[in-house]
Amino acid sequence: MNNNLPLVSIITVNYNESQVTIDLLTSLRHLTYKNVEVIVVDNASPNDDPSIIKETFPEIMLITSEENLGFAGGNNLGVKVAKGDYLLFINNDTIVPEHFLEPLVETLQKDTGIGMVSPKIKFHWDPSKIQYAGYTPMNKWTIRNQSIGYHKMDDGSYDTEGVTASIHGAAMMVPGHVIEEVGMMNEMYFLYYEEHDWAEMIKRAGYSIYYQPKSYILHKESLSTGKNSPLKTYYIARNRIVFARRNFSFKYLWFSMLFQTVVSIPKNLITFLLKGQFEHLKAFSNAIFWNLTHFKLTK
Protein backbone atom coordinates (compact mmCIF):
# COMPACT_ATOMS: atom_id res chain seq x y z
CA MET A 1 0.00 0.00 0.00
CA ASN A 2 1.29 3.47 -0.89
CA ASN A 3 0.21 5.84 1.85
CA ASN A 4 1.18 8.84 -0.30
CA LEU A 5 -1.76 8.09 -2.56
CA PRO A 6 -5.36 8.92 -1.61
CA LEU A 7 -7.32 5.85 -0.58
CA VAL A 8 -9.86 4.74 -3.18
CA SER A 9 -12.81 2.64 -2.04
CA ILE A 10 -13.98 0.43 -4.91
CA ILE A 11 -17.61 -0.60 -4.47
CA THR A 12 -19.42 -3.18 -6.59
CA VAL A 13 -22.74 -4.97 -6.18
CA ASN A 14 -23.25 -8.68 -6.80
CA TYR A 15 -26.59 -10.30 -7.59
CA ASN A 16 -26.58 -13.96 -8.65
CA GLU A 17 -23.31 -13.41 -10.51
CA SER A 18 -20.43 -14.52 -8.31
CA GLN A 19 -18.33 -15.70 -11.24
CA VAL A 20 -18.91 -12.42 -13.09
CA THR A 21 -17.86 -10.53 -9.97
CA ILE A 22 -14.80 -12.74 -9.63
CA ASP A 23 -13.80 -11.81 -13.19
CA LEU A 24 -13.96 -8.12 -12.23
CA LEU A 25 -11.97 -8.69 -9.03
CA THR A 26 -9.33 -10.60 -10.98
CA SER A 27 -8.80 -7.54 -13.17
CA LEU A 28 -8.73 -5.27 -10.11
CA ARG A 29 -5.89 -7.32 -8.64
CA HIS A 30 -3.67 -6.10 -11.47
CA LEU A 31 -4.23 -2.39 -10.80
CA THR A 32 -1.05 -0.33 -10.68
CA TYR A 33 -2.76 2.04 -8.22
CA LYS A 34 -2.27 0.17 -4.96
CA ASN A 35 -3.95 2.22 -2.24
CA VAL A 36 -7.41 0.73 -2.59
CA GLU A 37 -10.00 -1.11 -0.56
CA VAL A 38 -12.48 -3.31 -2.41
CA ILE A 39 -16.03 -3.67 -1.09
CA VAL A 40 -18.43 -6.22 -2.59
CA VAL A 41 -22.10 -5.99 -1.62
CA ASP A 42 -24.18 -9.08 -2.24
CA ASN A 43 -27.77 -7.95 -2.80
CA ALA A 44 -29.43 -11.01 -1.20
CA SER A 45 -28.69 -13.27 -4.19
CA PRO A 46 -31.34 -16.04 -4.18
CA ASN A 47 -29.57 -18.39 -6.58
CA ASP A 48 -25.93 -17.79 -5.80
CA ASP A 49 -23.46 -18.37 -2.97
CA PRO A 50 -21.37 -15.21 -2.63
CA SER A 51 -19.05 -16.83 -0.09
CA ILE A 52 -16.94 -18.06 -3.02
CA ILE A 53 -16.04 -14.40 -3.68
CA LYS A 54 -14.52 -13.97 -0.21
CA GLU A 55 -12.83 -17.37 -0.41
CA THR A 56 -11.21 -16.45 -3.71
CA PHE A 57 -10.36 -12.88 -2.70
CA PRO A 58 -9.81 -12.82 1.09
CA GLU A 59 -8.51 -9.25 0.90
CA ILE A 60 -11.90 -7.79 -0.06
CA MET A 61 -14.72 -6.79 2.27
CA LEU A 62 -17.91 -8.76 1.58
CA ILE A 63 -21.21 -7.32 2.80
CA THR A 64 -24.29 -9.53 2.54
CA SER A 65 -27.60 -7.70 2.51
CA GLU A 66 -30.65 -9.41 3.92
CA GLU A 67 -32.79 -8.03 1.08
CA ASN A 68 -32.33 -6.90 -2.48
CA LEU A 69 -31.90 -3.14 -2.17
CA GLY A 70 -31.39 -2.45 -5.87
CA PHE A 71 -28.49 -0.62 -7.46
CA ALA A 72 -28.66 2.48 -5.28
CA GLY A 73 -29.35 0.68 -2.02
CA GLY A 74 -26.65 -1.92 -2.58
CA ASN A 75 -24.05 0.72 -3.37
CA ASN A 76 -25.18 2.80 -0.40
CA LEU A 77 -24.41 -0.14 1.90
CA GLY A 78 -20.89 0.01 0.58
CA VAL A 79 -20.70 3.77 1.11
CA LYS A 80 -21.55 3.34 4.78
CA VAL A 81 -18.41 1.28 5.44
CA ALA A 82 -16.08 2.90 2.90
CA LYS A 83 -13.05 4.77 4.24
CA GLY A 84 -11.71 6.17 0.98
CA ASP A 85 -10.97 9.74 0.01
CA TYR A 86 -12.56 8.81 -3.31
CA LEU A 87 -15.27 6.24 -3.90
CA LEU A 88 -15.44 4.33 -7.17
CA PHE A 89 -18.78 2.73 -8.00
CA ILE A 90 -18.31 0.07 -10.66
CA ASN A 91 -20.62 -2.54 -12.14
CA ASN A 92 -19.62 -6.11 -11.45
CA ASP A 93 -20.01 -6.97 -15.16
CA THR A 94 -16.97 -4.91 -16.13
CA ILE A 95 -13.28 -5.53 -16.69
CA VAL A 96 -10.67 -2.85 -15.99
CA PRO A 97 -7.16 -2.34 -17.40
CA GLU A 98 -4.28 -2.02 -14.96
CA HIS A 99 -3.83 1.79 -15.30
CA PHE A 100 -7.55 2.48 -14.98
CA LEU A 101 -7.57 4.38 -11.67
CA GLU A 102 -4.77 6.94 -11.99
CA PRO A 103 -6.46 9.29 -14.52
CA LEU A 104 -9.68 9.38 -12.49
CA VAL A 105 -7.92 10.20 -9.21
CA GLU A 106 -5.72 12.81 -10.90
CA THR A 107 -8.78 14.46 -12.44
CA LEU A 108 -10.46 14.92 -9.08
CA GLN A 109 -7.23 16.03 -7.39
CA LYS A 110 -6.54 18.72 -9.99
CA ASP A 111 -10.04 20.24 -9.94
CA THR A 112 -12.02 20.20 -6.70
CA GLY A 113 -14.98 21.66 -8.59
CA ILE A 114 -15.58 18.26 -10.21
CA GLY A 115 -18.12 16.23 -8.27
CA MET A 116 -18.17 13.05 -10.36
CA VAL A 117 -16.04 11.55 -13.10
CA SER A 118 -16.59 8.60 -15.44
CA PRO A 119 -14.10 6.97 -17.78
CA LYS A 120 -14.67 6.05 -21.39
CA ILE A 121 -16.77 2.87 -21.49
CA LYS A 122 -16.33 0.34 -24.27
CA PHE A 123 -18.19 -2.86 -25.02
CA HIS A 124 -16.60 -6.02 -23.70
CA TRP A 125 -17.83 -7.97 -26.72
CA ASP A 126 -16.10 -5.51 -29.05
CA PRO A 127 -13.57 -3.19 -27.38
CA SER A 128 -13.22 -1.22 -30.60
CA LYS A 129 -16.72 0.21 -30.04
CA ILE A 130 -17.76 2.84 -27.51
CA GLN A 131 -20.71 2.64 -25.16
CA TYR A 132 -20.16 5.95 -23.32
CA ALA A 133 -18.10 9.06 -23.99
CA GLY A 134 -20.26 11.50 -22.02
CA TYR A 135 -23.99 12.25 -22.11
CA THR A 136 -26.17 14.79 -23.86
CA PRO A 137 -28.47 16.85 -21.58
CA MET A 138 -31.72 15.22 -20.55
CA ASN A 139 -34.43 16.05 -23.08
CA LYS A 140 -37.19 17.95 -21.28
CA TRP A 141 -39.91 16.37 -23.45
CA THR A 142 -38.90 12.73 -23.74
CA ILE A 143 -36.95 12.55 -20.44
CA ARG A 144 -34.21 10.74 -22.30
CA ASN A 145 -30.57 11.49 -22.90
CA GLN A 146 -28.12 10.10 -25.42
CA SER A 147 -24.80 8.44 -24.76
CA ILE A 148 -22.20 10.31 -26.79
CA GLY A 149 -20.21 8.02 -29.06
CA TYR A 150 -22.59 5.09 -28.61
CA HIS A 151 -21.60 2.22 -30.93
CA LYS A 152 -19.02 4.43 -32.63
CA MET A 153 -15.49 3.19 -33.33
CA ASP A 154 -12.89 4.11 -30.74
CA ASP A 155 -10.70 5.87 -33.31
CA GLY A 156 -9.62 8.83 -31.17
CA SER A 157 -12.62 11.00 -32.01
CA TYR A 158 -13.90 10.75 -28.43
CA ASP A 159 -10.64 11.32 -26.58
CA THR A 160 -11.30 14.89 -25.46
CA GLU A 161 -11.91 15.14 -21.73
CA GLY A 162 -14.32 17.66 -20.29
CA VAL A 163 -17.55 18.53 -18.53
CA THR A 164 -20.54 16.43 -19.57
CA ALA A 165 -24.25 16.42 -18.77
CA SER A 166 -24.37 13.23 -16.73
CA ILE A 167 -22.46 10.30 -15.32
CA HIS A 168 -22.52 6.61 -16.25
CA GLY A 169 -23.48 4.25 -13.45
CA ALA A 170 -21.25 1.44 -14.73
CA ALA A 171 -18.19 3.35 -13.49
CA MET A 172 -18.23 6.62 -11.58
CA MET A 173 -15.82 8.09 -9.05
CA VAL A 174 -17.03 10.58 -6.44
CA PRO A 175 -15.00 12.36 -3.74
CA GLY A 176 -16.01 11.33 -0.24
CA HIS A 177 -16.58 14.93 0.84
CA VAL A 178 -19.09 15.43 -2.00
CA ILE A 179 -21.12 12.46 -0.78
CA GLU A 180 -21.02 13.83 2.76
CA GLU A 181 -22.29 17.18 1.48
CA VAL A 182 -24.91 16.02 -1.03
CA GLY A 183 -25.96 12.62 0.33
CA MET A 184 -26.06 9.15 -1.17
CA MET A 185 -28.08 7.89 -4.13
CA ASN A 186 -31.86 7.91 -3.73
CA GLU A 187 -32.94 4.32 -3.09
CA MET A 188 -36.47 4.88 -4.37
CA TYR A 189 -35.24 4.29 -7.92
CA PHE A 190 -34.05 0.71 -7.22
CA LEU A 191 -32.80 0.32 -10.82
CA TYR A 192 -32.10 2.87 -13.60
CA TYR A 193 -31.97 6.69 -13.55
CA GLU A 194 -30.55 6.81 -10.02
CA GLU A 195 -27.11 7.88 -11.25
CA HIS A 196 -28.67 10.67 -13.36
CA ASP A 197 -30.67 11.83 -10.35
CA TRP A 198 -27.50 11.78 -8.23
CA ALA A 199 -25.67 13.78 -10.89
CA GLU A 200 -28.42 16.42 -10.75
CA MET A 201 -28.13 16.58 -6.97
CA ILE A 202 -24.37 17.08 -7.25
CA LYS A 203 -24.73 19.73 -9.97
CA ARG A 204 -27.23 21.63 -7.84
CA ALA A 205 -24.57 21.69 -5.10
CA GLY A 206 -22.29 23.55 -7.50
CA TYR A 207 -20.11 20.74 -8.85
CA SER A 208 -19.56 19.63 -12.43
CA ILE A 209 -19.76 16.16 -14.02
CA TYR A 210 -16.68 15.10 -15.96
CA TYR A 211 -15.71 12.63 -18.69
CA GLN A 212 -12.14 11.32 -18.61
CA PRO A 213 -11.17 9.25 -21.70
CA LYS A 214 -7.62 8.66 -20.45
CA SER A 215 -9.26 5.90 -18.44
CA TYR A 216 -11.58 3.21 -19.78
CA ILE A 217 -13.41 0.03 -18.82
CA LEU A 218 -14.98 -2.85 -20.74
CA HIS A 219 -18.67 -3.39 -20.00
CA LYS A 220 -20.58 -6.64 -20.53
CA GLU A 221 -23.89 -4.75 -20.08
CA SER A 222 -27.22 -5.68 -18.42
CA LEU A 223 -26.29 -9.17 -17.27
CA SER A 224 -28.27 -9.17 -14.02
CA THR A 225 -31.49 -7.62 -15.37
CA GLY A 226 -31.50 -8.89 -18.94
CA LYS A 227 -31.17 -6.67 -22.01
CA ASN A 228 -34.92 -6.61 -22.72
CA SER A 229 -36.56 -7.97 -19.60
CA PRO A 230 -39.96 -6.87 -18.23
CA LEU A 231 -38.09 -5.86 -15.07
CA LYS A 232 -36.02 -3.42 -17.11
CA THR A 233 -39.14 -2.15 -18.90
CA TYR A 234 -40.86 -1.47 -15.58
CA TYR A 235 -38.06 0.43 -13.86
CA ILE A 236 -37.00 2.48 -16.87
CA ALA A 237 -40.62 3.55 -17.55
CA ARG A 238 -41.36 4.24 -13.89
CA ASN A 239 -38.12 6.03 -13.12
CA ARG A 240 -38.09 8.17 -16.24
CA ILE A 241 -41.17 9.91 -14.88
CA VAL A 242 -39.82 9.91 -11.32
CA PHE A 243 -36.68 11.65 -12.55
CA ALA A 244 -38.72 14.40 -14.22
CA ARG A 245 -40.88 14.84 -11.14
CA ARG A 246 -37.81 15.25 -8.93
CA ASN A 247 -35.61 17.35 -11.20
CA PHE A 248 -37.65 19.39 -13.71
CA SER A 249 -39.03 22.84 -13.02
CA PHE A 250 -42.82 23.11 -13.02
CA LYS A 251 -42.86 24.46 -16.60
CA TYR A 252 -40.74 21.66 -18.05
CA LEU A 253 -42.48 19.03 -15.94
CA TRP A 254 -45.82 20.13 -17.38
CA PHE A 255 -44.46 19.92 -20.95
CA SER A 256 -42.88 16.51 -20.37
CA MET A 257 -45.98 15.04 -18.76
CA LEU A 258 -48.09 16.33 -21.64
CA PHE A 259 -45.74 14.64 -24.11
CA GLN A 260 -45.77 11.40 -22.09
CA THR A 261 -49.57 11.38 -21.91
CA VAL A 262 -50.28 12.25 -25.55
CA VAL A 263 -47.36 10.58 -27.34
CA SER A 264 -45.01 8.35 -25.41
CA ILE A 265 -47.35 6.30 -23.21
CA PRO A 266 -49.90 5.49 -25.98
CA LYS A 267 -47.07 4.66 -28.41
CA ASN A 268 -45.46 2.19 -25.99
CA LEU A 269 -48.74 0.56 -25.03
CA ILE A 270 -49.70 0.05 -28.68
CA THR A 271 -46.22 -1.23 -29.59
CA PHE A 272 -46.18 -3.86 -26.83
CA LEU A 273 -49.73 -4.89 -27.73
CA LEU A 274 -49.07 -5.25 -31.47
CA LYS A 275 -45.88 -7.22 -30.85
CA GLY A 276 -47.66 -9.53 -28.43
CA GLN A 277 -45.22 -8.60 -25.65
CA PHE A 278 -47.81 -8.89 -22.91
CA GLU A 279 -45.35 -9.18 -20.02
CA HIS A 280 -43.75 -5.93 -21.12
CA LEU A 281 -47.21 -4.39 -21.57
CA LYS A 282 -48.09 -5.29 -18.00
CA ALA A 283 -44.76 -4.02 -16.68
CA PHE A 284 -45.12 -0.71 -18.53
CA SER A 285 -48.71 -0.26 -17.34
CA ASN A 286 -47.67 -0.95 -13.76
CA ALA A 287 -44.91 1.66 -14.07
CA ILE A 288 -47.37 4.35 -15.12
CA PHE A 289 -49.86 3.30 -12.44
CA TRP A 290 -47.13 3.56 -9.78
CA ASN A 291 -46.59 7.23 -10.63
CA LEU A 292 -50.34 7.90 -10.60
CA THR A 293 -50.63 6.45 -7.09
CA HIS A 294 -47.46 7.88 -5.54
CA PHE A 295 -48.00 11.61 -5.34
CA LYS A 296 -45.26 12.31 -2.80
CA LEU A 297 -41.69 11.35 -3.69
CA THR A 298 -38.85 10.96 -1.22
CA LYS A 299 -36.15 13.61 -1.32
Image (cartoon, grey):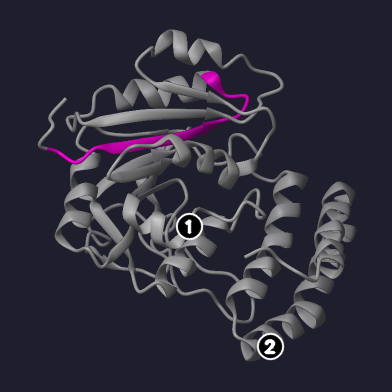
Q: Residue at x 86, y 57 (%)?
A: 286
Queried whether the magenta region covers residue 275, the answer comes back as no
- Image quarter where the C terminus lies is bottom right
> Can you see residue 8?
yes
Residue pointed to by mark 1: 183
Expressed as whole percent of the image width and height from the top left, the position of residue 195 reads: 51, 56
Depth order, front residue of 166/89: 89
Q: Which residue appears at 25% of the width and 54% of the height?
A: 213
Q: In which quarter of the view is residue 266 placed? A: bottom right
Bin the neighbour count of mark 1 within 10 Å (Cα to Cα): few under 14, some 14-19, many 20 and up.
few
Which one is in front, 265 or 248?
A: 248
Q: Residue 143 location in percent, x, y? A: 62, 73
x%, y% of residue 240? 66, 65
Would residue 117 be seen by someone viewing this image from the given angle?
no
Residue 248 position (above or below residue 157): below
Q: Amino acid at mark 2?
A: Phe
Q: Farthest residue to the bottom: give it.
A: 251
In the depicted structure, whether residue 189 falls above or below residue 52? below
Circle 2 is placed at which residue position?
255
Which region of the structure is painted magenta?
A: 5-18
Q: Tell me, yes or no, whether the highlighted magenta stretch contains residue 7.
A: yes
Is residue 252 positioned above or below 213 on the image? below
